[in-house]
Amino acid sequence: MKRILQGSLWFLLARLVALLSLSWEGLVAHNDLLFFYRLAALPGWPFVHYWAEYPPLFSWLIQALYRLMPSQPGFVYLLAFLISVAQGVSLGLLWALAEEGFPDEAPRRALAYGMLTTVGLLYAWGCYDPLVVAFTLGEVYLWRREHLWGAGTLLGLGILSKWFPALVFPAWFRRRGSAALRALVPAVGLTLIVWGLAYAMAPNMALASLMSQMSKGSWETVWALIDGNLHTGLFGPLPTRFDPQQATVTYGNPPRLSPWVTLLPFLALGWWAWRRIRPQQAAHEMAFIGLTSALFFLWVPGYSPQWMLYLLPWVFLSLPWPRALLFGLTLTLIHLMEWPLALSRGMFTALWWIIPLRTFLIALLGLAFWEAATAKSKEN
């Protein structure tokens, strides 16, 4: 544990040096930091005076940071620092989890993960997804140590930041159904309380916020190519946030295949896999979570390049070392080609080959997760 803590602190120190040495243009390039500032600067409070495309926890966090540090540079540096802390925490948690499944390889797996998520995906410190990843790895860490209420609390906080942390639940329920249900109690309780408060304060804005992500259409997926949508997942201008009806506006062409229809085969495949996986070891459980995540990202109508941050932990926590490194490097490369190389330069036609290639890689990764989740235990 001492080595893990030292590794996380060294990472954070290196990140602080990078933050202080980068030019302003380099700090805010190819990320969402300035957008978060402009969003936080809107008059009023999210879910009360305007709808927000982000769940309550992050929306209120940036609002609090803006009130603490209303200047643009102060806000940007403070948020970048908090995201860096979250990345350092994630690095330590991944290292600790890797000690269970791969005790001899844990340091190099953590090093590879840290290099790919902080050097390879440098723009990741300008999106808020590292905060969600930290919650996700934290809940899995506590779950593995049977701290069920703690795991459930972090699961609830993660869901209040983004819905993705809930993807761990099928693996939890398969391994220990009754324990998973006990962990679900604080998660559901937190989620209902916070969203209930938001609804009580302004029902129209709370409902608009809930509907916003489901209504905006497809982007950067094979479904988007089928629909003829060559754009990113950004919403309209910020002033539209004050009109709850704008939250349900579909950007681009409407779907030719309803997501509810395409969901059915993925649910069937997930159920088939769920019945056959028996997660006995840590690596089996991590691979199960990875498989669930891969199926979700293959189905979801929209996809953003930084979402590979939700796949990489399970790559290094479940796959054999050479395969984990190969998948990590390949996924990082294709996502960098998507953003910032192509899309930041307006090369949207490149999506016609980037999206199929990325989808193919995620499908291959899903197969690798399946093999790892169903591999025989070492004791056998």
Image (cartoon, helix red, strand yellow):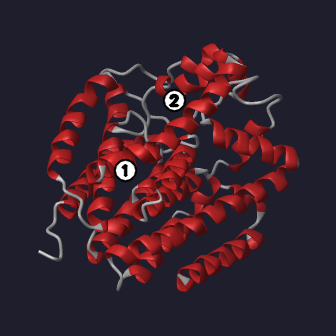
* Residue 151, position as x, y percentages in the image: 49, 54
Amino acid found under the numbered disc labelled 2: Gln
Residue at point 30%, 52% (across, down):
176
Q: 10 Å neighbourhood of mark 2: few (<14), some, or many (≥20)? A: some
Q: Quick check: 370 above or below 181?
A: below
Q: Quick check: 204 above or below 131?
A: above
Residue at point 36%, 61% (across, down):
314
The quadrant the C terminus occupies is bottom left
Secondary structure of the residue carrying numbered label 1? helix
Left or right: 296 as drawn, with respect to 54 = left
* Residue 146, position as x, y percentages in the image: 42, 61
Instruction: Identify the image quadrant of residue 85.
Output: bottom right
**Residue 173 appearing in the image:** yes
* Residue 318, position as x, y percentages in the image: 30, 67
Amino acid found under the numbered disc labelled 1: Ala
Q: Quick check: 133 above or below 40?
A: below
Task: Return the residue nearer the eye: 288 or 240.
Answer: 288
Instruction: Identify the image quadrant of residue 255.
Output: top left
Left or right: 98 as drawn, with respect to 160 = left
In the rendering, which numbered label is found on residue 179? 1
Q: Nearer the viewer, mark 2 or mark 1?
A: 1
Residue at point 77%, 54% (across, down):
76
In the rendering, which numbered label is found on residue 213? 2
Mark pair 2, 1: CA separation? 31 Å
The residue furthest left is 380
* Residue 223, position as x, y percentages in the image: 33, 32
Q: 10 Å neighbourhood of mark 1: few (<14), some, or many (≥20)? A: some
Residue at point 73%, 47% (across, down):
34
Secondary structure of the residue carrying numbered label 2? helix
Task: Return the residue nearer the eye: 68 or 229.
Answer: 68
